[in-house]
Amino acid sequence: MYRAPVDEIVFTLRHVCGLGDLQKNPRHSELGDDLVDAIVNEAGRFAAEEIAPLNAVADKHGTPLRDGTVSTPPGWREAYHAWIEGGWNGLSADVESGGQGLPQMLSAAAMEMWNSGSMAFAIGPTLTIGAVEAMEKHASDDLKATYLDKLVSGEWMGTMNLTEPQAGSDLNALRAKAERNDDGTYRIFGQKIFITYGDHDLTDNIVHMVLARLPDAPAGTRGISMFLVPKFLVNQDGSLGARNDVRVAGVEHKLGIHGSPTCTMVYGDEGGAIGWLVGEENKGLACMFTMMNNARLAVGIQGLGVAERAYQQALHYAIDRKQGRAPGDSGEGMSPIARHPDIKRMLLTMKSKTQVARAICYACAHAIDMANVSEDEAGRTFWNERASLLTPIAKALSTDFGVEVASLGVQIHGGMGYVEETGAAQHLRDARIAPIYEGTNGIQSIDLVLRKLPLSGGEHIKGFIAELKAVAGEVATSNRPEFGATAARLGESVRDLEEATGYMLAALADGRTADALSGATPYLRVAGLALGGALLARGALRSSEEPAERQAERTLLARSFCETVLGETGGLKSDIVLSADAIKAFDPEALAS
């Protein structure tokens, strides 16, 4: 059973991540507290009552391919159509496109709950939202008139077609071809793999966003263009016409998210799939990054959603399951395992990591929103840089935490967690893809170190660190004994981040790129852990208006995370500084020969 943590979500939005900043902005003047509460509560109700009950069913059923068509699991189509009837697909889309124009923060909150209900269900709409964002920013007015309103409403779904058998993370190797037609359209040829919701029976049409090369395109990523390729062509009156020359050639048999069809798509077997250019020729990379940047935050939210579901299930199991006698228990019979210190330790770790993922993802969404509403250039620059800095952290740390929390959930279930009947294993299987797709977490670390640390000549990251220091100082001056060593441990973690940042910036300035990249993954984790500790502490400091038991819970959560998990940052800092020589000396190919 899943119950949406509505109170926790609303508190995090308002008191930890700055929703009030947006409510004060004229562009969101109608976004009162009552409306926020109503949206979050209804999204939570839908996730718990409509989506969550289908999760296990979908895991067992999968998405079979028969006679060239993919079928989704039982109940999937009905749930999806109820979802679009509720207007959820266009929550943050532009009002001019038929959306509701609400902040990304509210979209992030809703997406968390939908992913807790079923990650396999929520990933489909996530890709459609990405296609909407690409069209809003890059498509021609004619394309928008034909496709955008139906994508915003969810009547049609969208996909992202990037990966090819020889071109995964490196798009320089992309081979799909596009040829110009005399009427301004293009013919698309090639194969794409790992295409999420590439084919299904949820909607009458599917709008594929496809990367391909023109015959005279420059080499490398400078020669990539993006094309809109519908499953069915659209007539002048908006009705569906002939089937386009695109087909699904297979569905992957995956470790998890079995309810999500992951397809191999083939374009141009019968003369070429008809496509329309999105943006400009040879500038498809900009269109792709419009989709991928927010998609990376969305994947971080997937990690968060699965972590919350795994935590809730483990908590209920630990309360119900009785084994042994916990220290201090009296009376007859065995104790619930939730009373045993080691189980309590694991549950506390699960809860704190889940809340850290929530706070970081919402903080990233807040930065995106602030960049969108800022009226002066300095404000837009600052918030764009903050969103850029937080995106790889939100994607990588939250998905790592999703796996770690789901794994602890299996551990708490014991042997029953290792069999499929309890459902604990499904959460771990589902979560494991999130650190891989939309740019592996290793790529997120590279992005953070090579592209985000140098923003504003390194001044933005320094200002970010100063903000974390200020939170540690605020905890210290609060003089609340219940914080324990929170201030000291948080301060040490922030200093670890500061020293590691200095090392990274110096390595980049000296041209020691290999040294910097050798420590990129531990560096991202240091940054995420320090930020997570600060956000938990901020939540505890700002909980004074809550009931006493909630204040105590938030303080305990921050204290536990800072006194235990933050201990990692010192060792990680050493890894960053000391590991480069060994990594550079290691020759895997020599060992394999």
Image (tube, rainbow, N blue to C red):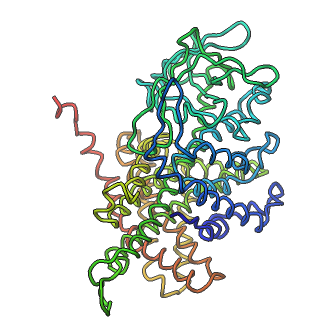
**Residue 123, above or below 112:** above
Residue drawn at the location 54% of the way across and 56% of the way down: 52
Image-quadrant location for residue 526: bottom left
- Would residue 509 be seen by someone viewing this image from the given angle? no
Quadrant where the C terminus sits is top left
**Residue 41, above or below 185:** below
526 left or right of 379 in image: left
> Is 440 or 525 nearer to us in this picture?
440
Q: Give how far across and how far down residue 399 sits, in percent.
A: 46, 52
Residue drawn at the location 74% of the way across and 48% of the way down: 377
Tell how many labels. Answer: 0
Residue drawn at the location 38% of the way across and 73% of the way down: 318
Q: Give how far across and how far down residue 208 sits, in percent.
A: 61, 28
Residue lying furthest top: 182
Residue lying furthest bottom: 331
> Is 310 or 321 nearer to us in this picture?
321
496 left or right of 215 in image: left
Q: Give how far across and how far down residue 499 sits, in percent.
A: 42, 59
Q: Give how far across and how far down residue 556 sits, in percent.
A: 47, 79
- Would residue 592 be seen by someone viewing this image from the given angle? yes
433 left or right of 380 in image: left
> Is 271 or 444 nearer to us in this picture?
271
**Residue 88, above or below 529:** above
